[in-house]
Image (cartoon, rainbow, N blue to C red):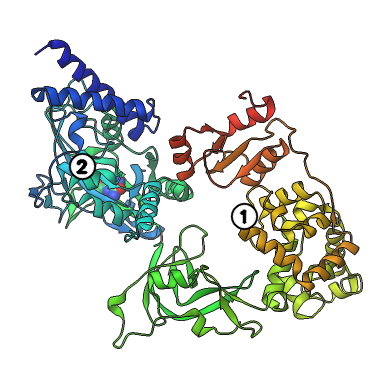
Amino acid sequence: MHADVRERAAALRARIEDANYRYYVLDDPDLPDAEYDRLLRELQDLEAAHPELVTPDSPTQRVGVTPAGEFMPVEHAIPMLSLNNAFTEAEVAAFDRRVREALGREQDTIEYAVEPKFDGLAVSLVYQDGLFVRGATRGDGYTGEDVSANLRTIRAIPMRLAADRPPALLEVRGEVLMLKRDFERLNAEALARGDKTFVNPRNAAAGSLRQLDPRVTAQRRLSFYAYGIGRCEGAPMPDTHAGIMDWIESMHLPVCAQRATALGVAGLLDYFAWLGALRPGLPFDIDGAVYKVNRLADQHALGYVARAPRFAIAHKYPAQEALTVVEAIEAQVGRTGTLTPVARLRPVFVGGVTVTNATLHNQDEIDRKDVRVGDTVIVRRAGDVIPEVVRVLTERRGDPPPPRFDLLRQYPTCPECGAPVIRLEGEAAARCSNGLACPAQRKQALWHFASRRAMDIDGLGEKLIDQLIDRGLVATPADLYDPERVNVATLAGLDRMAEKSAENLLTAIAASRGRDLGRFLHALGIRHVGEQTAKDLARHFGSLDALMAADETALLQVPDVGPVVAGSIRAFFAEPHNRAVIEALRRAGAWRDGTPAAPGTGVLAGRTLVLTGTLPTLTRDQAKARIEAAGGKVAGSVSGKTDYVVAGAEAGSKLDKAIALGVTVLDEAALLNLLEQGDPSP
Ligand code: 9MJ
């Protein structure tokens, strides 16, 4: 065989593995996907023509192994012990005290290596002379299962260590996990196929790693982070845990960037707080921090108690999930009359707060999760989002089981006004049929009218609106501008209002007169007419009268307006009550006709941009305003018509789609540059 073929195969392998390292470990890819695929195909073809060229560390060997019948047991030469947990600062302080006492260094400040506690599955990877030879799950700590074929599919795990003189034997330990974005994509795909979804990234990772067919695992995009080593032979070892982490990082093993060292209890608690603040933005789930005595000689001296090391501890964040019981399911009436079912829960402490309610969204969601009154459920609270029911423990249902919950049967009439509740064909939502005669809808409509992105009436909050409606001072948005109803005397008589705050509110109401037509249309709260559609309508028709006179054909001329939106607009303006309110608002001078921000001008005229993720300095609203001020349009989803995607931290599937469609991706700096310099492309 020709030496040049062998050389080419070796070069391809090195290039592909380097691309894997850059993409999956450094998160800094340097090779377009198409080029990567081309190189991999070339290598596959070479190896197919010359099977003797195939090496066990070849990237072609990551998938393509035939399914195993079962996983073989693997004994861990050094047991894979678990960590003891600390839940309070006092427990962390007690841990540190035990360490100092056991080392006979009561007066010293101990140095710890500190790192996130990954919420994944522990595995051990064995490298012989730098080559990956076997990987196993933790199992019971003494015996695990050989999941080598599945671990090979994880691109972040090097098949060959990057070291000139690798150790003769090195056992790396770490966690296999699924990144949050990969988890979301997996579930979205499962949902689209009508398959079962996974409850959380940990379960998805576990289910994927224990697949008998590695081809399935390969499609799941698992990740890996090393957190230590087991056996090491034939190489000098660093003398601290932090040193070991740096060492294995140099061999291209993935270690997380959030590791550090900390001094004493104060240092540990500082790190815990710092990591806790980062937690929501991390690409993976963590459930705490791990503290390890940094010096290996000290670790050795401390040894083990029962089944856990005495030199390390896991400091856990309060649980994000908890078990509780659904005591009732009630409906809340929203702005457009939608009845949103809410589970009333037996109070339970989750993620640092007591949770008593969880949203159930709509009847479809209730059906999908099959939530019934009396059920024991898992509730989750993540960040400051509304708590949700993750899953019902159906096995805990009594006999006979409680009946299925049917929102329409439970609420044939609106709980706020008693009007019939209807569910339109093809809609998930049930809604009150009473429109603005329903006080709950009135309140929501008024709240929306006054909100920042509509009429922007500063100081008109929920509590005030409740009082204005409940006391009959205000029934419609137009009443806000009626001095007979809303004045210093009437306002000052409300709870939590004094003369000064009443005057401030009146000033804010007065300042809202004459808002541009786009904002005003948005403020009206016409179903299916959001902020962008409102702007498009204002731009297209230029005056409210022109819009009110438009028939369906005329409405369909407006970008993104289809028959449903057009129908909703026509129905809104056909309603006599709405026409009366609009006439009153006209007399109050609430809006100003005319076309906002003349289209066709500005550096981004005619360009469509999509925002995703968190930008470093601009809020989403600010970025949107800047783009629109430059004549550009901000769309909600990426399509062939998208000119740019502006991506920040934690960008999600929109970024993936942009890359797939070849849409130019900008970061914030590039966006600002574009706004300043203009768009060079035709
Ligand atoms: C996790 N789960 O992230 C350890 N771990 O160290 C970290 N687990 C561990 N270290 C010794 N970061 C036993 C387990």
Q: Nearer the viewer, residue 367 or 170?
A: 367
Q: Looking at the image, tell me whether mark 2 or mark 1 is earlier in sequence order.
A: 2
Above or below — where is 546 with respect to 640? below
Between 653 and 37, the one nearer to me in the picture: 37
Task: Name which quarter of the figure residue 381 lies in.
Answer: bottom left
Along the horizontal axis of the image, is 482 left or right of 24? right
Residue at x 64% of width, y 78% of height: 433
Q: Is residue 215 left or right of residue 316?
A: left
Q: Is residue 99 visible?
A: no
**What x and y, as percent, mark residue 350?**
43, 66
Secondary structure of the residue carrying numbered label 2: helix
Residue drawn at 29 percent across, 44 percent down: 222
Residue occupying image coordinates x 8% and y 23%: 52
In the image, which disc is placed on residue 562?
A: 1
Disc 1 residue crowd, few under 14, some 14–19, many 20+, Cα 10 Å: few
Q: Residue at x 65, y 69 (%)?
A: 335
- In the picture, the quarter occupied by the N terminus is top left
Picture mark count: 2
370 and 38: which one is in front? 38
User: According to the image, label 2 marks what residue?
Assistant: 151
Position of residue 642 measured from the top left corner of the image (x, y, whole percent): 56, 38
SS state under label 1: loop
Instruction: Determine whether 627 is above or below 364 in the image.
Output: above
At label 2, which amino acid type do we have? Leu
Is 115 drawn above or below residue 55 in the view shown? below
Residue 313 versus residue 250 in the image, above or below: below
